[in-house]
Image (cartoon, rainbow, N blue to C red):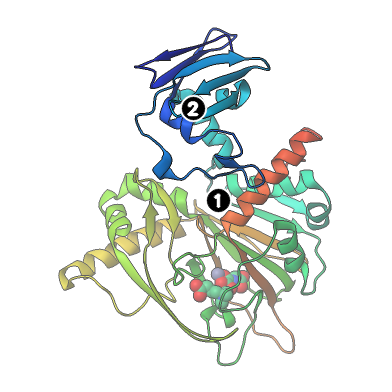
C-alpha cells in the first residue's frame, strides 16, 4: 500500500497500491471485518461481532498506514482494527476484482458437449492415490460433467473408497450405496432389466444428489449400454429453438413421488421445475425422471396439454442423436457424473441367469465434491503445477 485516504466524510477509505491503481473500502465493511480476536474467532475464522454492534454509518476516526504493509483504523468508540495489504487487495470492490475472486471460489467454467464427446477417463487407483489425479477428476467432473474411472476391482467396495476420498457419500432411502440389478418386486424401475429413458436421478428429493457414481461389477452380454446427454446444454438449445417450451418447463412446478421400502420405508413427495433456472434465468439444474413424475399434476386443466407439449419438445431434443453419447460399461468401470446437469439412460438387457448385470451406485453432494476440489487445488498448487488431464477415449 502506498497511501490511504479517508473520503465521503470518512465513511470510505481509498487505498492506492504500488502499481498506481486504487481500491475503495466502505468503512461499514471494514468495521464488520475487523481481524482482531474480539471481532473474529481466529480458530474458526468466523465473525464474532454481532450485527447489532455494527453502525451502518460508521466513519473512521483515524486511518493510517502502519509498518508491515498494514492499514490501521481507529473507530469513534476507540476500537482499533488492522488489515494487511494483501488481504485487502484480494477483497477489492472493483467489478473486475470481484469477478476474479468469484471465479476462483466457484471453480472452472462448464464446457458444453454433444455426441462428439470423448469420455474423459482416468485410472481409478491413481485417483485414490495421487492428489493431482484426484484434482483432475473433480475439475473435469465440474467442467465436462462426466469422468469414467477405469480399472477398479469388479466387486463392491470401490464406491466407499471414492466416498472416503471425497469426504463422505450422500445417504438416501436406497441406502449408503445401492445395487442396480434385475430384482423381483422391484421398488424402482432401475431395478428391472428394462430400458431406462434419459433421466436425472431422484428429483423426488428436494435437494437431488449432485453427483452420481455407478460402478460396473457385471455387465449383460446383450444390451445394457449407457447413454449420456448434457442436459444444461440441451436446455439452452431449447431456449433458442422453442422459447415457449423452455419458459413453461422453467415455470411449472411438477410433482414427484417415490414410495416404498428399502433402507427404511419412505413416502417422498416434492415439487420441482424440470428446468431449474437461477435469478438471471440461466438453467442450473435438470429435474426430470419420467418414472417418478407423480400422477397428480398441479396445473389448471387448460395448461395440461401445453405442459405435455413442452416436455415432449425437451425430451425429443434430449434424445436427438447429435446430443447423445452411447457406450457400454465394462466390469471395473466407475462412471461419475453431474446429476444436476447430465441425463443418463440405459438400454434394456437380457436378464440372463444367475448373477447377471450388476452395478453398484452411490451419490455425493456438490458441497462435498466442490469442497474437496478446492482443497485439492490448493494442495496441488502448493506442490506440482497440475495433475494429468484425463485422456479422451
Ligand atoms: C439408475 C440408472 C443405469 C444403468 O439406477 O438410476 O440410471 O446403467 N442405472 O443401469
Ligand atoms: N436408484 C437408482 O429417481 C430415481 O428414482 C432414480 C434411484 C434406485 C437409487 C433411481
Ligand atoms: Zn439413474
Query: Exactly how many numbered labels are in the figure?
Result: 2
Q: Residue furthest bottom?
A: 185
Question: Marks 2 and 1: CB-CB under 8 Å?
Answer: no
Q: Residue at label 2?
A: 78
Q: Is residue 296 left or right of residue 109?
A: left
The quarter of the image holding the N terminus is top right
Residue 36 drawn above or below residue 297: above
Task: Please report whichever mark, 2 or 1, sits nearer to the chain's N-terminal start.
Answer: 2
Q: Position of residue 356 (x, y in %)?
A: 71, 82
Q: Is residue 207 above or below residue 246?
A: below
Per the rendering, the mark at residue 115 is 1
> Ligand 1 appears in which quadrant?
bottom right
Name the residue at the front extreme.
78
Instruction: Give the alpha-carbon distance from disc 2 to disc 1, as whole Å.
Output: 65 Å
Q: Residue 197: percent from the left, percent from the top?
A: 49, 70
* Residue drawn where x is 50% and y is 42% of the image: 49
Q: Can residue 118 be seen in the rendering of this structure?
A: no
Question: 346 or 249, which lies in front?
Answer: 249
Name the residue rendered at 31%, 65% in the picture: 253
User: Label 1 CB, ligand 1: below 8 Å?
Assistant: no
Amino acid at each position: 500500500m502506498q497511501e490511504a485516504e479517508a473520503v465521503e466524510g470518512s465513511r470510505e477509505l481509498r487505498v492506492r497500491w504500488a502499481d498506481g491503481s486504487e481500491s475503495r473500502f466502505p468503512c461499514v465493511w471494514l468495521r464488520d471485518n475487523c481481524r482482531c480476536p474480539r471481532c473474529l474467532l481466529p480458530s474458526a475464522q468466523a465473525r464474532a461481532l454481532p450485527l447489532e454492534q455494527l453502525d451502518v454509518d460508521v466513519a473512521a476516526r483515524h486511518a493510517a498506514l502502519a509498518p508491515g504493509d498494514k492499514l490501521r483504523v481507529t473507530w469513534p468508540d476507540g476500537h482499533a482494527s488492522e488489515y494487511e495489504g494483501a488481504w485487502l487487495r484480494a477483497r477489492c470492490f472493483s467489478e473486475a476484482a470481484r469477478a476474479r475472486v468469484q471465479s476462483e471460489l466457484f471453480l472452472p467454467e462448464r464446457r458444453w458437449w454433444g455426441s462428439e464427446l470423448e469420455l474423459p477417463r482416468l485410472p481409478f487407483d491413481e485417483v485414490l492415490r495421487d492428489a493431482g489425479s484426484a484434482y483432475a477428476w473433480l475439475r473435469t467432473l465440474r467442467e465436462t460433467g462426466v469422468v469414467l474411472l477405469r480399472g477398479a476391482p469388479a466387486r463392491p467396495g470401490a464406491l466407499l473408497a471414492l466416498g472416503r476420498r471425497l469426504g463422505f457419500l450422500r445417504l438416501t432411502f436406497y441406502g449408503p450405496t445401492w445395487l442396480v440389478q434385475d430384482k423381483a418386486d422391484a421398488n424402482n424401475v432401475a431395478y428391472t432389466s428394462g430400458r431406462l429413458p434419459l433421466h436425472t436421478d431422484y428429483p423426488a428429493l428436494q435437494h437431488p444428489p449432485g453427483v452420481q457414481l455407478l460402478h460396473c461389477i457385471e455387465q449383460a452380454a446383450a444390451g445394457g449400454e449407457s447413454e449420456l446427454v448434457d442436459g444444461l446444454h440441451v436446455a439452452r438449445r431449447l431456449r433458442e429453438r422453442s422459447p415457449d417450451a423452455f419458459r413453461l418447463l422453467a415455470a411449472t412446478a411438477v410433482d414427484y413421488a417415490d414410495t416404498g421400502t428399502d433402507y427404511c420405508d419412505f413416502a417422498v413427495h416434492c415439487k420441482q421445475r424440470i428446468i431449474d433456472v437461477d435469478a438471471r434465468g440461466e438453467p442450473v439444474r435438470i429435474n426430470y425422471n419420467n418414472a417418478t413424475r407423480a400422477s397428480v399434476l398441479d396445473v389448471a386443466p387448460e395448461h395440461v396439454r401445453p405442459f405435455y407439449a413442452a416436455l415432449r419438445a425437451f425430451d425429443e431434443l434430449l434424445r436427438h442423436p447429435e446430443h447423445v453419447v452411447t457406450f457400454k460399461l465394462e466390469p471395473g468401470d466407475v462412471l461419475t457424473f453431474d446429476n444436476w446437469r447430465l441425463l443418463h439412460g440405459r438400454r434394456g438387457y437380457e436378464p440372463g441367469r444367475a448373477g447377471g448385470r450388476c452395478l453398484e451406485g452411490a451419490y455425493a453432494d456438490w458441497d462435498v465434491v466442490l469442497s474437496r476440489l478446492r482443497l485439492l487445488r490448493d494442495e496441488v498448487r502448493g506442490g506440482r503445477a497440475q495433475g494429468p488431464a484425463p485422456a479422451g477415449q
